[in-house]
Amino acid sequence: MKYTEAKEELIQAWGNLGYSWGLNKTMAQIHALLMVSPKALSTEEIMQDLSISRGNANMNIRALLDWGIIARISVAGERKEFFKSEKNVWALARQVAKERRKRELEPILKVLKEVNDVQTDGSEESKEFKKVVKELKNFAEKSDGLLETFIRSEESWFWNTVLKMMK
Amino acid sequence: MKYTEAKEELIQAWGNLGYSWGLNKTMAQIHALLMVSPKALSTEEIMQDLSISRGNANMNIRALLDWGIIARISVAGERKEFFKSEKNVWALARQVAKERRKRELEPILKVLKEVNDVQTDGSEESKEFKKVVKELKNFAEKSDGLLETFIRSEESWFWNTVLKMMK
DNA sequence: ACGAACTTTCAATAACTATTGAAAGTTCGG
DNA sequence: CCGAACTTTCAATAGTTATTGAAAGTTCGT
């Protein structure tokens, strides 16, 4: 397999994976492109390489900046802005975990807390409801703790600990 | 807060969460409804409760069956089919992890393996590419192992181990 | 083997999300 | 303060995914 094909294929696959991680397809493709590129790229180059419009490139670059997984850099003597991706996969995963925790886990935890002190009207339905909410809350809180640890941890420490538990 | 409101709110919130976990909104709502319901429900009841059409109900129930997170049950003397959800949140999470591993991690691992033995043409680009692919592959494989452990593990063992590492 | 009770399918369409590209906005050297 | 170089916005539109509901299919008791 030739390098250009391989690059193409990786960008596609990364696009799909990113999509299921909460990014959108283009966002993930831009990210993949920046990941494999040894130097920072300009909007122009990204547009070209992925055959997308200026507006699209701009919006998705901004979203990636928001997620904190790419950085804007300036090159001396150039007016254009360039972008480069965090290359450390571990740091990337931590960043994604952080964002998703904020976007997904926090809202459900809020609802679970709210809904947890509903008054049961004595019906079987409402008793079951309370029970399920309690269980969900417990689970969500444990997951939150685990994520928190993941987000704060150092790579080597984390994998060492995890490898131990995988035995 | 009253029970009916609380139920409504939980179903909405669960719908959103489910969505970001790879289910679709209706699928997740049906699931939430079955979670909080003490008895198994018929298609009819699900349609009514969530105000959705027969076709929609049917398709999403089937998808939930495919994912293995709800079960079809028959009630003696009734011709209709009823559905109930796995109530154990842990078992549910394991099931979702299993499905997502199959749908997401496996394809990218396949691509990474394929792309890993690209011949470098000596360019800086292709060298960087190889480096990144190697890192990604390493990460994806470790994650795969971790997921595997999660999927196969028992609840108490898992949380005990995890709680230890969270210290 | 008929028909009532129920489930499944699927073409039409509604709802949502992503993309384009031209226009408006910003920045900066001279 | 002008205009070239660049970035951002946004209304129009393309593309995708979800939903409906009527029609076709299945199952089962009699």
Image (cartoon, coloured by chain):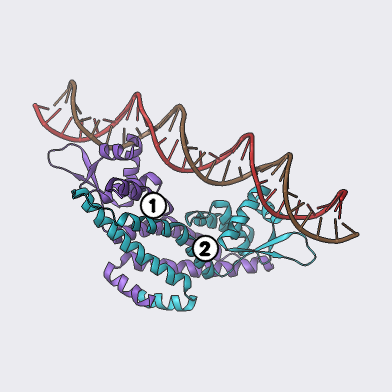
Chain colours: A cyan, B purple, C brown, D red
Task: Specify few, some or many for label 2: CA neighbours under 10 Å numbering under 14, 14-19, or 20 or more.
Answer: many
Please determine if labels 1 and 2 lie on a single subunit: yes
Alpha-carbon span between mark 1 and mark 2: 28 Å
At 47% from the left and 70% from the top, the residue drawn is: A151
Towards the viewer: B158 or A167: B158
At 35% from the left and 37% from the top, the residue drawn is: B52
Tell which tag, 1 or 2, sits nearer the viewer.
1
- In the rendered structure, the answer to whether residue A13 lies left or right of residue A75 reads left
- In the rendered structure, the answer to whether residue B156 lies left or right of residue A89 reads left
Is A107 located above or below residue D18 in the figure? below
Q: Chain of mark 1?
A: B
Q: Residue under label 1, please give it.
A: B18
Q: Quadrant of residue D14?
A: top right
The disc placed on residue A99 is none
Which percent across, then down, holds residue C4?
A: 18, 25
Q: How many marks?
A: 2
- In the rendered structure, the answer to whether residue A151 lies left or right of residue A62 reads left
User: Hey, what amino acid is under mark 2?
Assistant: Leu
Which percent across, then down, holds residue A54?
A: 68, 49
Q: Secondary structure at mark 1?
A: helix
Q: Residue under label 2, please give it.
A: B112
Give whichever of discs 1 and 2 has the lower sequence position.
1
Which percent across, then down, holds residue B65?
A: 30, 48
